Image (tube, rainbow, N blue to C red):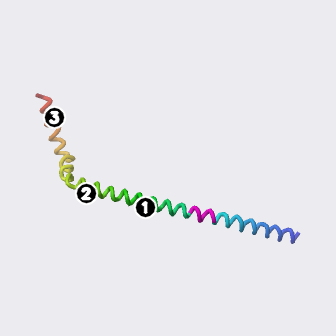
Amino acid sequence: MLVAAGLAIVVEAVLAAIWGTAVAKRAVKLSERLNSGRGLLQADLETLRLALEETERLWRPYRTILRWVNHPLFIALLASYRRRRLLR
């Protein structure tokens, strides 16, 4: 009985070692895939950051105009002009 229990422990240890190495290999492959995906993501983020910087640079001359146009008093002024024009 003791020999059978010892043999069962040895068999379980061998199976655990085989399973552990398989899991380790899969973990390494997964880690490599994650790193390559992370690299692609970083490249895409850098491209997006550059595009946002370019967009901001291109819109810079219009910033003051947009600030005036979006002001509530300017919008109210345009609405009053529209009402006056519709009354005529």
Quarter of the rendering occupied by the N terminus = bottom right
The residue positioned farthest toward the right in the image shown: 1
Q: CA distance from mark 1 to mark 2?
A: 22 Å
The picture quadrant where one finds residue 19 is bottom right
Q: CA distance from mark 1 to mark 3?
A: 50 Å
The picture quadrant where one finds residue 10 is bottom right
Which of the labelled discs sits on residue 82, or is there none? Answer: 3
Of 51 and 81, nearer the camera is: 51
Q: Which residue is mark 1?
A: 42
Q: Residue at x 28, y 54 (%)?
A: 55
Q: Is residue 26 magenta?
A: yes
Earlier-in-chain disc, 1 versus 2: 1
Quarter of the rendering occupied by the C terminus = top left
Label 3 Cα neighbours within 10 Å, binned few <14 / some 14-19 / many ≥20: few
What segment carries the magenta color?
A: 25-30
In the structure shown, which secondary structural element does the residue marked by tag 2 occupy? helix
Q: Which residue is mark 2?
A: 57
In the structure shown, which secondary structural element does the residue marked by tag 1 occupy? helix
